[in-house]
Image (cartoon, rainbow, N blue to C red):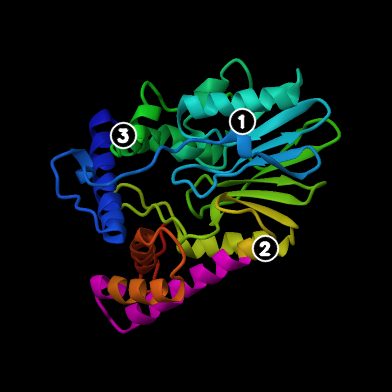
Amino acid sequence: MTQDRAQDMAQHMTRNTAQGSARDTGQDTDRSLPGDLAGVHVPDPAVRVAGAREIAPALLVIPNQRAQLVPNVGVIGGTRAVLVVETGLGTANAERVLAFASEVARGRRLYLTTTHFHPEHAFGAQAFADRATYLVNRAQADDLAAKGPAYLEMFRGFGGPVAHRLAGIGVPTPDEVFDGTYDLDLGDRVVRLRPAGRGHTKGDQVVEVPDADVLFTGDLAETGQFAIFPWFPPYDTDVSGVRWLEVLERLGARGVRTVVPGHGEPGGPEVLTAVRDYLRELRDETWRRRDSAMGEDEIVAEVRALLVERHPEWAGQEWIERGVGCLCAEHPSHEVPH
């Protein structure tokens, strides 16, 4: 992707994201800054390692504490090595995570993986250079190379603390890229890195810890908010509501005991069930109106009002519109893109 195309894509995506956020907050975004983001305030997305808690033996989660653009971070220990899942946004966050993981490891080898390429999950990997081996699935590596520059520009467009945390950052490059499922032996514990198939992104990866019955989902699942649909046509249309549902069906069938979502509180299998049920609801309400030849703007208005009424406590209302757009494109009257 050329730099000009990346900047064009970033400005388009930030403008649409900002407009959605403004509808939720009542803020004015009609300003002159790039991406029309002048009126949108994004709090500092700081990873708080002091909140880390053990959810299984030698398996810790640094929770996002409901903070915007902060993922749940995992630190998974074995007798010979420690795996970190997610970096947080930017090197300062990642350095905190690295310091915490190094204290846990006490000389054991360090590995890093990320669940997908979005900046708050992966764009701190540079801090781990020469300290840990960064490994990801092939489709995620392809996403980093193809779309990472535009997402970096988009996130910088939020300005303030987000831009500050991304100052001097480049798109990370994995040390190892694998095809298929990868079993990482940490010593008396094998962690399975499993590509999930297209859903939230093309390169989604889940992290399974079979002996502890724990699953890290990345943004395939969240709690307390509407599902995040990065649907930004014509630049990024890789998200698929239809296939995301299929992924959640497969993950739910495994019956794991503990689910660590990309954002929000960890829980049990009900985390997967709740997101699956919401995606069905979003699909059914969208397609029912599409069947009646209703225009997309009218579908968005009706479905948004209905889902906000049903889930008034959830954050991220701007993602409803993105989800409706995606599912309109995936309506059976259209060919689902491959």
Q: Amino acid at mark 2?
A: Gly
Q: Earlier in the sequence, mark 3 or mark 1?
A: 1
Q: Are marks 3 and 1 in contact (CB under 8 Å)?
A: no
Q: Distance of mark 3 from mark 2, alpha carbons? A: 39 Å
Residue range in magenta is: 273-299
Q: Which residue is mark 1?
A: 135
203 and 121: which one is in front?
121
Q: Which residue is mark 3?
A: 160
* Residue under label 2: 252
Quadrant in the rendering for residue 95: top right
Name which residue lies at 59% across and 29% down.
97
Q: Find residue 307 and report its image quarter.
A: bottom left
Give the residue displayed 36% in from the left and 33% down from the top.
Answer: 161
**Closer to the camera, 112 or 270?**
270
Quick one: which residue is furthest to the top in this view?
130
Secondary structure beneath dot 1 equals: strand
The three-letter amino acid code for the residue at tag 3 is Gly
Q: CA distance from mark 3 to mark 1?
A: 31 Å
Side of 192 where 131 appears, left or right: left
